[in-house]
Image: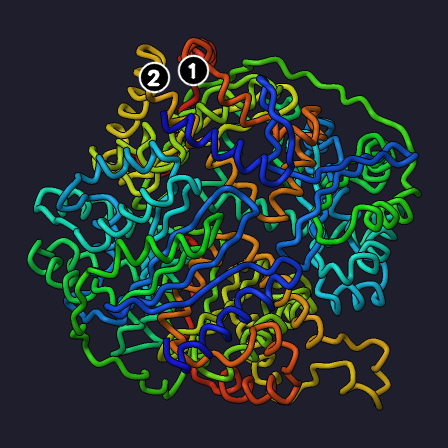
């Protein structure tokens, strides 16, 4: 009943902003004014106009990421991308700094990203300066060493911070040394083995037109954005690179891992594999996450509310091109970690054995829709979301399809999905803390 | 509405609407209900969501050594443990059934309660928000359950070196003042707290005249105001009986402590007093913080890296409070480099009172072409942060609700306009007053196995 209501809000909202005629198969346009352009070199430009502020956010996706790294060269994709945002001259640094424009790089499984945030009045100047390093980066020894030092500090941070460490351990257990199992910042050894030639080759192979999506959300007009991106990004050579991968799910080396840390609390994770990303799987995984651990009064929330078990309880679904993961986390006093682990396992067991009722499914749908809206309110988040779906092959308009896809999932479908993926044979348990 | 209020309304509207969103003017209005509750409503139709936030003028500033933690405990009880009409579980399930996100944040000055919900369910959200805030029921059983969760939360802060270090830093910086208390509270107080004590604390502070309600989202302003009046205006108000809170005594000298924890890296945390929320120096202090340690390639980073990667990471922040402010520097670094880093940081902070900030100040210098216009850079970064923060409706609602409690009626011009006016002299003045003085609260956390 309430789900119908929220759906009707979206429809009314849709009518209000886009005047789209409704047919039986409702095509919701919650994110209006989306446009796509193709540059001659194959770069795809996604654009949305948004007048809420006077800033422009650009998210550049470069297909490749951890998956494209050779086993012994982990960290290579981040290192190369980070070097491609390292400005060339002091004059460039001065100008970017004066405008207050922010440029940063991030690593991920199937791609790396570059985020640029600037006052819209400085958009062209920012892109002009940035494009110099992006289209012709300087891979000098000093620069490479500088970024490697930064990456080594990040590796140390990951070892220290349990929430980061647990992800790193899980990815390695789940995927071994096949692509997704390698850490974003590499290891001390892999960084040592990466040389200038590796970086140049990686850049030459992956920084090519058809591998790149540029997603822009701005108060500026699309014609201006297109003109500027075309003007400064045309130097990127055209072409596409196929990524060789050896991912076959599930690859499971070990199902349990304990890592000692002298803390009052223990961090516990139970994780399962998920399928590769596609339109339906993304909606199903999103629903699973909402059902299980996202938000108050999800299933895992009961462990906090009734069992008084913990303050921090959450879950996360992550879908990649060739596989995915679903993880649930709870942080508890180490003296009760066994109890917490058992209760966590029971929640998964109950979910799979008893399935999801119609009513619970309807509630999860409402929350999925509202949550997806909330997550995509800022320009920065929207630029990321549109680009993310485009680079992973679902298309930049997927966010508008998401609502229909979620709404059309029935209890039979979700229960089959749960049974298939939350299989105890594929489960991994990790505990970081003291022994109980 | 009297003329003073009308002027304030116009100022507020220009502050939050026209200056921030010049290309998409949004309808907004500020009113005061008969019971004294301040209400601000702003239409924003970018997504079909509405955000409801109430800021309550209560925080750890209103606690003493025996009650430290009561506000935080209350925040949890209000969010999760039920009202006179419904249990916590019923409220939670109702919220979830309507796709609502709800949360709360306890602060030193102000505590906020938030709901973000599809706009169709505005009436439901407003009703339940009122019920949670003004009809709390505290049973012994529910209180004991929530205490256990809070004790877990406190444990998690103890495990986090940055959080733990900041707790010690605040204690040293505000000795004998409630700002020195941890917001999440003292474990012993939490364990001992009774239903009667918490209920009496609640009854005192949760009265409409002590609250500001802010609505931002996909809602008709006039309808929202009508509904707010219908639901909130009949709640009676009383005068809050609060302990007298004054500005903290000045810190007379640097206080330093060294502690050990199970960590891989060392943490150097330096705190100093800053301007209060209502001070004219607040925005210059924000800009100065960006230049020294928080912005693009800041001075501390440059100075520390010049010596060959002395540190792993640096963070600098400035938080203005009602009666003071805190400027914090947090550095993670290899343990053997702490002494050198501390020396360099002190030097950078001292130099800040006499150094040049804008390119124009290098006009006759041979370094002119190499000089960085740090002031212009920081101003533009601050504008970007401001715009980006205000793209999110819930952030806007929280900021305005807090603002209505903290700033009261002293708004004169917009944040962006104030940024534009800052000069290098303003920065040097603020640096001389707050950064230059050798009156720091320093906490060093070293790995336990360092000696080995």
Residue shown at the point (92%, 42%) measured from the top left: A234
- Residue A223 in the image: state x and y as whole percent: 84, 47
Q: Is residue A151 above or below residue B412?
A: above
Residue at 49%, 21% (x, y): give it.
A407
- Comes first in the chain, label 1 or label 2: 2
Task: Say above or below: A195 vs A11.
Answer: below
- A30 sits left or right of B240 in the view: right
Residue indicated by mark 2: A351
Label 1's element?
loop
Q: Name the image quarter holding residue A121.
A: bottom right
Subunit that carries the residue with mark 1:
A
Residue A163 higher or lower than A239, as above or below? below
**Is residue B30 something that shows in the picture?**
yes
Disc 1: CA contacts within 10 A as few (<14), some (14-19) or many (>=20): some
**Where, quadrant-wise, is the N terminus of chain B in this rendering?**
bottom left
Q: Between residue B36 and residue A76, name the one nearer to us.
A: B36
Q: Where is residue A49 in the image (x, y as percent from the top left)?
A: 70, 47
Give how far across and how far down residue B141 sits, in percent.
9, 42
Query: Regarding mark 2 in the picture, which secondary structure is present there?
Result: helix
Judge by depth and name the residue closer to the eye, B178 or B444: B178
User: Any mark on residue A422, and which?
Assistant: 1
Say if mark 1 contacts mark 2, CB within 8 Å. yes
Mark 2 Cα-neighbour bin, 10 Å: few <14, some 14–19, many ≥20: some
**Does residue A414 appear left or right of residue A54 in this picture?**
left
Q: Kindly report the distance in space between the C-alpha atoms of the residues bearing marks 1 and 2.
A: 9 Å
Q: Give how far across and how far down residue B150 sits, in percent.
A: 24, 49
Q: Is residue A123 left or right of residue A171?
A: right
């Amino acid at each position: 009943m309430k789900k119908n209501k929220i759906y009707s809000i979206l429809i009314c909202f849709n009518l209000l902003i886009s005047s789209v005629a409704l047919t039986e198969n409702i095509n919701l346009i919650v994110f209006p004014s989306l446009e796509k352009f193709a540059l001659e070199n194959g770069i795809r430009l996604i654009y949305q106009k948004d007048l809420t502020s006077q800033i422009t956010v650009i998210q550049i996706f470069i297909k490749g990421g951890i998956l494209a790294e050779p086993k012994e060269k982990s960290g290579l994709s981040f290192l190369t991308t980070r070097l491609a945002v390292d400005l060339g001259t002091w004059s460039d640094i001065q100008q970017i700094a004066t405008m207050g424009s922010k440029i940063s790089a991030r690593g991920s499984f199937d791609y790396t990203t570059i985020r640029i945030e600037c006052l819209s009045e400085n958009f062209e100047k920012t892109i002009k300066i940035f494009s110099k390093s992006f289209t012709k980066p300087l891979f000098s020894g000093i620069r490479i060493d500088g970024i490697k030092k930064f990456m080594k500090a990040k590796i140390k941070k990951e070892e220290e911070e349990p929430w980061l460490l647990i992800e790193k351990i899980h990815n390695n257990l789940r995927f071994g040394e096949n692509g997704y199992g390698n850490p974003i910042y590499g290891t001390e050894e892999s960084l040592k083995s990466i040389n200038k030639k590796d970086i140049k080759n990686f850049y030459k192979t992956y920084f090519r037109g058809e591998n790149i999506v540029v997603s822009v959300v701005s108060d500026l007009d699309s014609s201006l954005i297109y003109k500027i991106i075309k003007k400064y990004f045309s130097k990127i050579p055209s072409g596409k690179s196929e990524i060789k991968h050896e991912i076959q799910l599930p690859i499971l080396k070990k199902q349990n891992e304990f890592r000692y840390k002298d803390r009052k609390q223990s961090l516990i994770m139970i994780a399962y594999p998920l399928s590769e990303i596609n339109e339906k799987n993304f909606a199903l995984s999103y629903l699973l996450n909402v059902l299980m651990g996202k938000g108050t009064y999800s299933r895992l929330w009961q462990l906090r509310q009734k069992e008084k078990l913990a303050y921090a309880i959450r879950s996360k679904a992550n879908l990649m091109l060739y596989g995915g993961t679903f993880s649930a986390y709870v942080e508890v006093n180490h003296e009760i970690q066994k109890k917490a682990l058992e209760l966590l396992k029971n929640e998964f067991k109950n979910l799979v054995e008893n399935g999801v009722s119609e009513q619970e499914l309807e509630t999860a749908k409402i929350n999925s829709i509202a949550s997806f809206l909330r997550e995509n309110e800022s320009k920065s988040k929207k630029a990321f979301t549109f680009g993310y779906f485009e680079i992973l092959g679902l298309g930049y308009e997927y966010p508008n399809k998401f609502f229909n896809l979620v709404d059309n999932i029935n209890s039979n479908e979700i229960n089959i999905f749960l049974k298939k993926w939350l299989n105890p044979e594929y489960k991994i348990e990790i505990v970081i803390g003291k022994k109980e | 509405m009297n003329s003073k209020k009308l002027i304030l309304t116009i100022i507020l509207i220009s502050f939050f609407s026209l200056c921030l969103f010049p290309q998409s003017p949004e309808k907004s209005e500020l009113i005061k209900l008969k019971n004294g509750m301040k209400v601000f409503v702003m239409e924003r139709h970018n997504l079909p969501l509405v955000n409801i936030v109430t800021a309550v003028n209560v925080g750890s500033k209103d606690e003493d050594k025996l009650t430290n933690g009561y506000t935080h405990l209350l925040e949890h009880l209000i969010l999760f443990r039920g009202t006179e009409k419904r249990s916590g579980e019923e409220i939670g399930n109702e919220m979830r059934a309507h796709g609502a996100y709800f949360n709360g944040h306890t602060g030193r000055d102000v505590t906020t309660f938030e709901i973000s919900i599809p706009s169709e369910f505005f009436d439901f959200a407003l009703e339940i928000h009122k019920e949670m805030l003004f009809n709390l029921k505290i049973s012994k059983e529910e209180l004991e359950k929530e205490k256990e969760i809070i004790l877990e939360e406190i444990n998690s802060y103890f495990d986090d070196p940055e959080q733990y270090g900041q707790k010690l830093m605040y204690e040293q910086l505000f000795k004998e003042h409630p700002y020195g208390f941890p917001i999440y509270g003292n474990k012993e107080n939490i364990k001992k707290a009774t239903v009667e004590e918490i209920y009496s604390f609640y009854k005192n502070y949760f009265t409409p005249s002590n609250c500001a309600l802010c609505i931002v989202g996909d809602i008709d302003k006039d309808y929202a105001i009508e509904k707010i009046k219908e639901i909130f205006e009949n709640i009676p108000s009383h005068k809050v009986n609060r302990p007298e809170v004054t500005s903290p005594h000045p810190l007379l000298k640097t206080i330093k402590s060294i502690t050990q924890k199970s960590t891989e890296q060392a943490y150097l945390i330096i705190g100093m007093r800053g301007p209060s929320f209502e001070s004219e120096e607040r925005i210059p202090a924000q800009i100065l913080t960006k230049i020294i340690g928080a912005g693009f390639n800041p001075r501390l980073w440059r100075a520390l890296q010049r010596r060959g990667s002395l540190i792993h990471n640096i963070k600098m922040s400035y938080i203005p409070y009602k009666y003071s402010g805190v400027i914090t520097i947090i550095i993670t670094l290899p343990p053997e480099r702490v002494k050198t880093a501390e020396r360099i940081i002190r030097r950078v902070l001292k130099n800040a009172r006499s150094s040049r900030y804008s390119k124009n100040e290098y006009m006759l210098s041979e370094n002119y072409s190499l000089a960085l216009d740090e002031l212009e850079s920081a101003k533009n970064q601050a504008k970007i942060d401001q715009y980006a923060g205000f793209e999110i409706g819930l952030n806007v609602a929280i900021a305005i609700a807090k603002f209505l409690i903290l700033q009261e009626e002293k708004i004169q011009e917009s944040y962006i306009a104030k940024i534009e006016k800052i000069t290098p002299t303003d920065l040097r003045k603020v640096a001389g007053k707050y950064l230059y003085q050798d009156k720091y609260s320093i906490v060093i956390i070293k790995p336990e196995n360092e000696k080995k």
